[in-house]
Amino acid sequence: MSADPSPEAEELERFRAYLHLLARARLDPRLQAKLDPSDIVQQTLLEALQALKGFQRRSREEMACWLRQILARNLANALRDFRRDKRDVAREQALDELAARSSARVEAWLAAEQSSPSQRAERAEDEARLATALEGLPELLREVVVLRHLHDWSLTEIARHVGRTPSAVGSLLHRGMVELRRRLRERE
């Protein structure tokens, strides 16, 4: 966020991997060439840093919930802006459909935020552990795990997306899951 981070910035920075996982999960990967999850996370952290003084409650769970709300709003705004700024209608039609589906996922996510505080806190803690473990995976392993388990893509769709055969993707997925489980056990 800055060259010499303040304690507040360092506090928020601990949530970067978690927010990145959430943004990646809510945004269709085929849109990521146009809407980068890292940019949305950066915007979220910047807005949070600017508003941090007004944020009264400071437990980790409350902070995660507050950051999720900012991220969800930024994702919704980015998707809405993307859909509004279409250029070539014929070329952008498929991407517009993907944006609509991603937007629906963000809306469903916001609706799910209505659970109890203890449920949200437990879920946030689990998601933070998962995000940190995922971020530690090599890029290709992380990508196939995210596409399969967060976006529910088939092996064939993933293979097309990453330029590998379905059997190679199956092997990558297996290795990724083994490594992810190992990392999660280490963090317990």
Image (cartoon, rainbow, N blue to C red):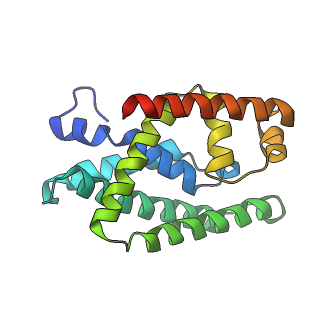
Q: Residue at x 41, y 28 (%)?
A: 186
> Is 13 on the left-hand or right-hand side of 77?
left
Residue 123: give x, y in percent of width and height: 39, 56
Towards the viewer: 167 or 74: 167
**Can see residue 164?**
no
In the picture, measured across the screen, residue 51 lies left or right of residue 136, that is left
Q: Nearer the viewer, residue 57 or 45?
A: 57
Kindly tell me whether residue 157 is visible in this rendering: yes
Image coordinates for residue 109, horizontal then vertical, percent: 49, 66
Screen quadrant of the C terminus: top left
177 displayed left or right of 188: right
At horizontal 57% and vertical 62% (from top left) the residue drawn is 79
Percent position (x, y) of residue 91? 82, 58
Q: Residue at x 56, y 52 (%)?
A: 25
Q: Quadrant of residue 184?
A: top left
For the N terminus, give its image quadrant: top left
- Total numbered badges shown on the rendered structure: 0
As displayed, is residue 171 above or below residue 80?
above
Whether 170 is drawn above or below 30: the answer is above
Q: Position of residue 19 (x, y in %)?
A: 42, 47
Q: Does 102 sit left or right of 164 as displayed?
A: left
Residue 44, compared with residue 107, is above or below; it is above
Kindly indicate the quadrant of the structure image that contains residue 56: bottom left
Residue at coordinates 27% horizontally, 43% vertically from top-left?
A: 12
